[in-house]
Image: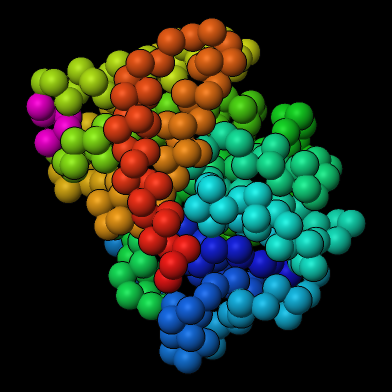
Amino acid sequence: MRIVVFGTGGVGGYFGGRVAQSGEDVTFIARGEHLRAIQTSGLRVDSPFGDFLIHPAKATDDVTEAGQADLVIVAVKAWQVPEVARAMKPVVGPATTILPLENGVEAPDQLAAELGSERVIGGLCKIVSYIVEPGHIRHAGFEPSVTFGELNNRRTKRVERIQEIFTKAGISSTVATDIKVALWTKFLFIISFSGIGALRGKPAGEIRTNPESRALLLKAMEEVYAVGRARGVDLPEDSVEKAMATVDSLPDDGTSSMQRDIASGRPSELESQNGAIVRMAREVGVEAPTHELIYNTLLPLEMAARRRAKTM
């Protein structure tokens, strides 16, 4: 299978790397020093499940060099998805399947609007990983897993084939019975944890043991649950309880990518996470004061980071 990975950061680098390690034909789309390091020395991944090096690795910043793909894995920042949807057209053919592994819930619709709903499936992943230095990815938490499925929840040959690819690569994978519920289950966890973590500037251990932070986190999760249910998503009644259990299982120093980006002054997924739930809450007439607080407090930092990025 010819696979193109758009975004060779912590997520794309790990999952794409594992698939390449298993012998599949993988091309990584990257840029800058990260790209040059991969082209020169390969893609290095450190993981509790075994370190590995993909060398030589097929990597480029020129999409036209990649050729038409059977599967495109989208692992960029959520706010980059609309731009990437336009950029990936040279690798998308009639039989191409597009699998987004994003933190938000809007990516499938954004990709479908540009590339056609018949090419897009829904997906999400579970992993804590990040770029240590150019060409070097570190997997730091969670047993890596991928959940995906057709947007209409049908079990098709293409999702079964994709699951075979992940299984061959040693990646735990699940074909969702209801992909929308799966996406919103992660959404409930990640935007609440990311938002409170960024707002308080504290890692998981301090957030969950501080009574005020824990209460705020609980309220944030309850708001996402209420919005999801109001939008027709059949979230289970124990969704918040399970999300809190996930927080309790994180390493004490665990942080989210959005939190790390904001702390470092980089553009983040604030708009696609907390901003998205604020917009969606207003659409269905549900109050989300905790996420409004998070979004409105962090927005000036986000806007400043985006201004700096434009001048670099």
Instruction: Say whether residue 209 is magenta.
Output: yes
Residue 312 coordinates in the image, percent (x, y): 42, 71
Residue at 44% across, 67% down: 311
Q: Determine if residue 170 is in view.
A: no
Left or right: 39, with 49 as reference point: right
Left or right: 271, with 48 as reference point: right
- Is residue 125 depicted above or below 83 in this figure? above
| Magenta-highlighted residues | 206-210
Which image quadrant is residue 117 in? Answer: top right
In front: 136, or 166?
A: 136
Residue 68 coordinates in the image, percent (x, y): 80, 69
Q: Quadrant of the N terminus?
A: bottom right
Residue at 58% across, 11% down: 284
In front: 7, or 279?
A: 279
Left or right: 48, with 86 as reference point: left
- Is residue 99 depicted above or below 154 in this figure? below
Residue at 23% across, 20% down: 216
Instruction: Say whether residue 223 is magenta.
Output: no
In front: 175, or 91?
A: 91
Residue at 11% across, 21% down: 211
Residue 192 coordinates in the image, percent (x, y): 35, 29
* Magenta stretch, main secondary structure class: helix
Residue 53 coordinates in the image, percent (x, y): 43, 80
Q: Determine if residue 117 is in view.
A: yes
